[in-house]
Amino acid sequence: MEIHGIFLLCYLFLALGVGVDGFPMNDLITKLPGQPDVSFRQFAGYIGLDEGVAGRSLFYYFVEAENDPTNQPLTIWLTGGSGCSSVGDAFSSVGPFITTKNARGLKRNLFSWNKVSNLLFIDSPIGAGWSYSNTSSDYNNGDDSTTKLLVTFMQKWYETYPSFKSRDLYLAGSSYAGHYVPNLANALLDANKQSKELKFNLKGIALGNPMLRRKLDILARYDFFHTLGLVDSGTYAEAKKECNTIDEDNYFSKFQANWTYTCHVFLNYSPFMFHNDAFDSYYENSKLFDAIRDPCVVNFTDLRLGKKLTKVSKGVDMCTYIRPDFYFNLPGVLKAFHANRTNLPKRWKGCQNITEDKFQYNQNDKNRDMLPVLKSLLQQSVPITILSGDVDGMVPATGTLHHLYKLTEEMNIELTKHEAWSYKNKVGGRKYSFGDLLTFFTVRDGNHHVTFSKPSEALYIFTNFTINRMH
């Protein structure tokens, strides 16, 4: 009778689309097109956030840890932008696969973070990747609405994957995730205080090249490029003079009246525009992203013809982050991911364009000061690891370090250690330890996405200083 009862229970679970371990088998990915065989499982699908007319749903991609997934933590990865797909980013950064050079298949990512953790990628906010709403106003996003939806998502995701409710939880992300991740971490801790049942077991956060104080981050670009000789001394001096009221003690969400029009111009345009008669926006973006490497020239026509798209510059294939935009639009990929269930006739994009798509994000929120949120997390004993590529011109490491000095000064936290750190017997960059909870790494020759340009170093830092908490 006992054996018969077990078989009956298994049959009922399968009939309901639920595996014996509580996972939703309807979301199980059998195999992605062009994917090599692996031993771990993958799931993808939607989590509905409400039952009403709004129909808000966030898309997710969940990957089990390579080894012993039931005893490994869960890490949520959020990609910045704002408006970029975390799921798409998985295939050029910390996920288990990277697209092949012809973008028609996948190969194993030797430095995937699922070597040490289960991974959950969430397309957020509404409009990013395959996430959607039936209400057009939901595409007008901001920090507060994004955080609120992510908390709801996590509550409902744990209902779908109940075995993770008590699991150690880490949050990570890059770029504008400098807003997403700390905001979500703080909101999950607040949710813990209000809930008697579900408790998020938050153990730490990791941020890559995070935007923390946007206006000061932009001004830091002038410092950075001036030291490289890419911004002339006259332009540099004028920028510093016109924007001299934007400092650590005068940082607000909105532009203040005493900031000049010229300062606004410096904040809203590239440093290169002011001394380059033949200004090239592609040159601008590539140099902001990576100051030392040649960019990949996007050519989807070659990919459609079956040719390879690759550009290796100083040891990095600069086309790696571009190829998913082709792969995700291949026949069969959408079906394998259980995506686009509303059957919208649109091309998948890694990042939304506010001039072309209906996606919008509150501009004032982008200027928010994130130091108070980091302060709140440190006061609640949440460890924070920050890694910044030292050739990133988008959010220069020197600016981020300056923010951390300001934060720790306010909190009376001392710089307890400043030293070079090594990886495989080579200097990996500089390491700054502020007390026991805040650690900042510069990564030598890492660009705006360390996980893409220096994936082995990023995995080393995440494993040893986020999960295992070496000091």
Image (spheres, helix red, strand yellow):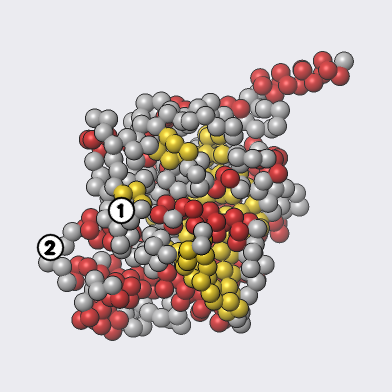
**Label 1: which residue?**
313
Residue 20 is at least partly visible in this image: yes
Taking depth in this image into account, of 454 and 46 the one nearest to the observer is 454
As drawn, is 214 to the left or to the right of 381? left
As drawn, is 192 to the left or to the right of 4? left
Numbered circle sitting on residue 97: none
Q: Position of residue 385 (x, y in %)?
A: 56, 64
Q: Is residue 334 above or below residue 388?
A: above
Taking depth in this image into account, of 80 and 116 the one nearest to the observer is 116
Residue sticking out furthest to the front: 425
Q: Position of residue 85 (x, y in %)?
A: 43, 45
Taking depth in this image into account, of 255 and 129 the one nearest to the observer is 129
Q: Position of residue 449 (x, y in %)?
A: 41, 56
Q: Measuring 87% from the left and 15% from the top, which residue is drawn there?
A: 1
Residue sticking out furthest to the left: 277
Numbered circle sitting on residue 278: 2
Residue sticking out furthest to the right: 1
Mark 1 vs mark 2, foreground winner is 1
Q: Quadrant of the C terminus?
A: bottom right
Q: Position of residue 127 (x, y in %)?
A: 41, 44
Q: Measuring 65% from the left and 58% from the top, which residue is drawn there?
A: 468
Q: Quadrant of residue 467?
A: bottom right
Q: Quadrant of residue 62?
A: top right
Q: Measuring 28% from the left and 75% from the top, which residue is drawn there?
A: 226
Q: Is residue 67 above or below residue 36?
A: below
Q: Is residue 397 above or below residue 450?
A: below
Type of amino acid at the residue the image marks with label 1: Ser
Type of amino acid at the residue the image marks with label 2: Ala
As drawn, is 184 to the left or to the right of 280? right
